[in-house]
């Protein structure tokens, strides 16, 4: 196992420990990472206690159909935007809508990734390595709020950009869950 993979596995374990201590679960919505966040989490023994589901929505149509991302958002800001990342994260939680689900310890947190992993597809405005992130939370009364959006620009090859994205979004999630 590479140092990079080992680092991601240790981070995933820590995320799992913190989620369990808060009686919480997560789900994912991924575009440029193509399921790598979910895969990293699932590689962690015991993740079935804190990971519920993952969506890979690579095309704009999939983002709209599966996660309810607004066509207006995609048209105005593009797929690679914090606006889209936020709607992807909330879309996951809207897929799990009932109060009964919430009361029964289902997903309270959702993370999303959307970006340009390269090596092609970048523009001057949205270069290769640009990744947008969203984190949403189902609050105690059941409402869903975006609690974090951000944009990072990573360097490296396609896999490296995807791995850096996984590391970043798990670090952000860990910080947010620890704060409650």
Image (cartoon, helix red, strand yellow):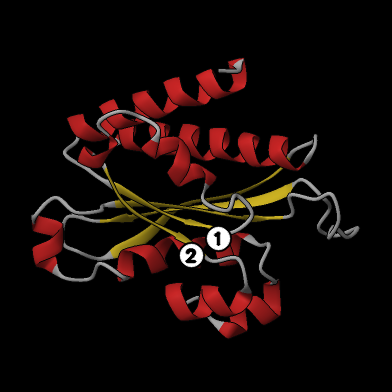
- The N terminus, quarter of image: top right
Q: Position of residue 153 (x, y in %)?
A: 75, 42
Q: Position of residue 148 (x, y in %)?
A: 48, 50
Question: Dot 1: few (<14), some (14–19), or many (≥20) neighbours within 10 Å?
Answer: many
Tell me: residue 152, above or below residue 96: above
Q: Quadrant of the C terminus?
A: top left
Q: Residue at x 66, y 68 (%)?
A: 79
Helix, strand or loop at label 1? It is helix
Rendering coords of residue 21 (x, y %): 19, 29
Residue at far bottom of view: 72
In the displayed structure image, the side of residue 11 where residue 142 appears, left or right: left
| Res 88 label | 2
Q: Which residue of the protein is positioned furthest toward the front in this rendering?
A: 1
Q: Secondary structure under badge 2?
A: helix
Q: Nearer the viewer, residue 74 or 7?
A: 7
Q: Residues within 10 Å of mark 2 (few under 14, many from 20)?
A: many
Figure check: 171 above or below 81: above
What numbered label is drawn on residue 85? Answer: 1
Answer with left or right where residue 171 lies relative to residue 78.
left
| Residue 178: image location, x then y, percent | 32, 30
The number of numbered discs placed on residues in the rendered structure image is 2
| Tag 2 near tag 1, CB within 8 Å | yes
Image disc number at residue 20: none
Q: In the depicted view, which residue is nearer to us: 69 or 83?
A: 69
Real-space Cα separation, disc 2 to disc 1, in angstroms: 5 Å
Question: Position of 27 compared to 167: left or right?
Answer: left
């Amino acid at each position: 196992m590479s140092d990079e993979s080992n680092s991601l596995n240790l981070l995933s374990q820590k995320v799992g420990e913190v989620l369990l201590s808060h009686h919480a679960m997560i789900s994912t919505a991924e575009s440029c990472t193509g399921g790598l966040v979910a895969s990293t989490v699932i590689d962690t023994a015991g993740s079935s206690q804190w990971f519920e589901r993952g969506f890979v929505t690579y095309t704009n149509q999939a983002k709209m159909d599966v996660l309810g991302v607004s066509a207006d958002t995609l048209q105005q800001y593009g797929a690679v935007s914090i606006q889209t990342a936020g709607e992807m994260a909330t879309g996951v939680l809207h897929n799990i809508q009932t109060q009964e689900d919430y009361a029964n310890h289902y997903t309270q947190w959702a993370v999303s990734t959307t970006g340009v992993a390269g090596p092609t597809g970048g523009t001057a405005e949205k270069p290769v390595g640009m990744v947008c992130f969203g984190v949403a939370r189902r609050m105690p009364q059941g409402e869903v709020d975006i609690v974090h959006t951000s944009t990072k620009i990573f360097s490296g090859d396609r896999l490296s950009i995807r791995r850096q994205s996984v590391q970043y979004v798990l670090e952000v999630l860990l910080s947010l869950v620890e704060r409650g």
